[in-house]
Image: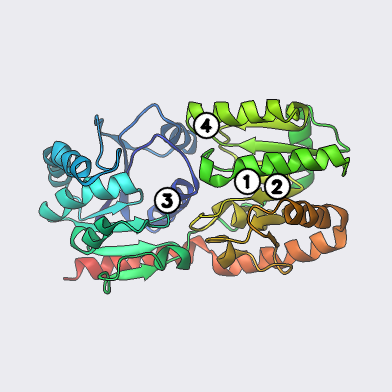
Amino acid sequence: MKILMPFVGDSVGGSHRSSIILYKTLRQNSLDVHILLHESHGPLAKLLSEEGIPYYFLPVKVLAGTTPGLLSIISGIIRNFRRFSKFIQSHKFDIIHGNDLRINLSWSVPSRISGAKFIWHQRTILSTSRLWKLIPYLCDHFISISAAVHSTIPSNLTENRSLIFNPFDIGAGENRLKSREALLEKYSISNDQFIIGYVGRLVDYKNIDFILYSLSVMIERGEHEIHCVIAGTGSDKYIKEIHNLVHELDISQQVTFMGFVSETDELIAGLDVLVAASSIDAFGRTLVEAMLQHTPVLAAAAGGHLEIVEDGVNGLLFSLDDQNDFSGKLLELLENPDKRERITATAYGQACDRYSSAAHADSIVLIYDKLLSY
């Protein structure tokens, strides 16, 4: 069994970290699995190099799905068809495991025609486009990462589908005190400030502007000394927009932009609260990462967050786009150490039980075996 996981390489998010954990676990189990990138100078190539993970490099000009529209998608598939088919056949791959929309659209047809099985791993909520009716004809098996994603799959996809939660390294606990001290020193943050943080891609649907607006109101009210760190990368345009917003709100002294961070576990362990305000996250990987670091979680009551966080039990949920509810719940966590300790202890135990990387890999291998048995 020889497996290929292709990636674009122009971003790093929760889906990429999940895929890397799966890759490592499969390799530990002696499976012949490989990674391919279409960009060799992007953030994913940097992360793989830091992790000591080798990869194939296959440059392309345009992938299917880079721009919306059926004609654009068809053009992207045709443009790369011969190269991808030749690569699959020359390296004798049995399974192509796609983890990104552009990859799924670009690699599915050449994979199936070349005789390889194609897995469509859907890590975001699907739109209502009729185009997705084609998915059953493009893949041999469809995997969704949450019930939120699973509920959006096309009605004609009735077989060869699975719901498998993302994997986590449940043994990667950090020293919270040392992590906090390192964070304070590196970014010159005062020790008497509470540190809240957002970790993830910098894109508009993550609702980062809501966090900033809410923070500015709390600062104006004088409700504790709060510092917000924002870790992640995105388009230059969007990064400029949120930098400008911080300047307009006059909270530059209370906000630190960290850029790309490879050691997210250490960062999250240093936070007093991890915040997530997105309305359409398919899963919310950083929420589980925080739970595994005993860092309390405050998340919008929407999307895949609802499958991870039980309000008041293993985290707190706030009403979407409700600044008063966000502020109230945040203060509830900051001002009640006993509640924080109870919530984080419960969260840690549940995360260890639900999101084992070994169990995840076992579920994936069962699909691999099934695909190659017929």
Residue type highlighted by circle 1? Asp
Label 4 vs 3, first from the N-terminus: 3
Q: Residue at 17%, 44% (x, y): give it.
A: 74
Q: Dots 4 and 3: beta carbons under 8 Å?
A: no
Q: Dots 1 and 2: beta carbons under 8 Å?
A: yes
Q: Which residue is mark 4?
A: 238
- Mark 4 to mark 2: distance in Å? 27 Å
Which element type, helix, strand or loop, lies under badge 4? helix
Label 1 vs 4, first from the N-terminus: 4
- Mark 4 to mark 3: distance in Å? 26 Å
Q: Residue at 47%, 31% (x, y): give it.
A: 235
In this view of the protein, can residue 5 be seen by the observer? Answer: no
Q: Which residue is mark 2?
A: 269
- Mark 1 to mark 2: distance in Å? 6 Å
The C terminus lies in quadrant: bottom left
In this view of the protein, can residue 212 be seen by the observer? Answer: yes
The answer to whether 36 appears left or right of 304 in the picture is left
Q: Residue at 75%, 30% (x, y): give it.
A: 251
Q: Give the numbered dot on residue 19.
A: 3
Which element type, helix, strand or loop, lies under badge 3? helix
Q: Which residue is mark 1?
A: 265
Residue 171 figure quarter: bottom right
